[in-house]
Amino acid sequence: MKEIVTSSRTRDIIRKHRFTFKKSLGQNFLIDGHVLDQIIEAAGLDESRGALEIGPGIGSLTEQLAKAAGKVTAVEIDRRLIPILQEVMSPYENVSIVQGDILKTDLKQLWQDQFASCEGVSVVANLPYYVTTPIIMKLLEEKLPLENIVVMVQKEVAQRMAANPGGKDFGSLSIAVQYYCEPQLVCIVPGKAFIPAPNVDSAVIKLKRRLEPAVSVPDEAKFFHVVQTAFSQRRKTLANNLSAFSGKERKGELSELLLQIGIQPERRAETLSLDEFARVSEALTKSGMMN
């Protein structure tokens, strides 16, 4: 039987089950086997490792994960897809289908239930555009024992995750991802690789989990609060945005504090490295400007 990823098999499954796409769920099914091959290669799976898939659709990626990994758990929010997935994945004993919203799922419990015997686990998924960032942040912030996150996302989002300081793509998402991971763009995927075809290009990005965060900070919550505040109005200078902490009456003191740690107050947030943000966060905390 043809693989699910082929256009003809995908259309056959859709027709057989009279499936209709829901725009609200961002459903686009991949029909390009070459892209799947690159995703699987980037994930670095083997029989000792597990894969968590988010939003499997009708199972084109799930099928390839089942061949590459020892254990696959696919979490699907759309109840209509569960019987389809159970049918097409029936030849693979190492696949579990879970119905649920990944953003409401207890991931630590899922890990215990599904991946206790695995030497390592990676998240491998074609993520819906509308929830890409919340899902990525949930995976990172819960500090799961992840090896890699290999996901297909909107091209512009992938570029922001991998961006270097100094460009327009560099922002709070870049810093959050790079604090926890080493990003690598795998490939660009045109709209014609999907049914139905989206109006924008996608990209596959690999986020290799760091053993330790990229920079050492005494308080992660304060570090990310500083980052978010610094980027709150991109056209404003660092000193202007960070005056949210100092208040206007202490703005001169804030500028002097930035100069003391080697950062010009008139710089903009997108020019600062992770290390520089760590220095700013620590300085603001020690000064008492951050409670």
Image (cartoon, helix red, strand yellow):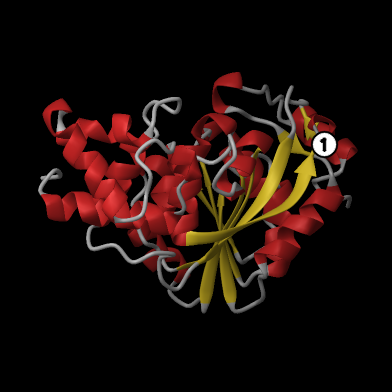
Secondary element type, mark 1: helix
Q: Is residue 107 visible?
A: yes
Residue 260 in picture, x, y percent from top left:
27, 54
123 or 232: nearer the viewer: 232
Label 1 crowd (10 A; few <14 / some 14-19 / many >=20): many
107 or 203: nearer the viewer: 203
Residue 37 in picture, x, y percent from top left:
80, 58
Q: Decide if residue 66 is on the left or right side of residue 147.
A: right
Identify the residue shown where x is 55% and y is 21%: 24
Q: Decide if residue 157 is on the left or right side of residue 198.
A: left
Q: Is residue 20 above or below residue 101?
A: above
Q: Is residue 235 above or below residue 30?
A: above
Where, by quadrant of the figure, is residue 18 drawn?
top right
Identify the residue shown where x is 52% and y is 38%: 132
Q: Is residue 258 above or below residue 50?
A: above
Identify the residue shown where x is 27% and y is 36%: 242
184 or 279: nearer the viewer: 279
Residue 148 in picture, x, y percent from top left:
56, 63
Q: Decide if residue 231 is on the left or right side of residue 290.
A: right
Which three-letter amino acid code belongs to the residue tagged 1? Ala
Query: Count the marks: how many?
Result: 1
Residue 85 in picture, x, y percent from top left:
64, 45
Label 1, on which residue?
193
Image quarter where the C terminus lies is top left
Q: Is residue 99 visible?
A: no
Identify the residue shown where x is 43% and y is 38%: 267
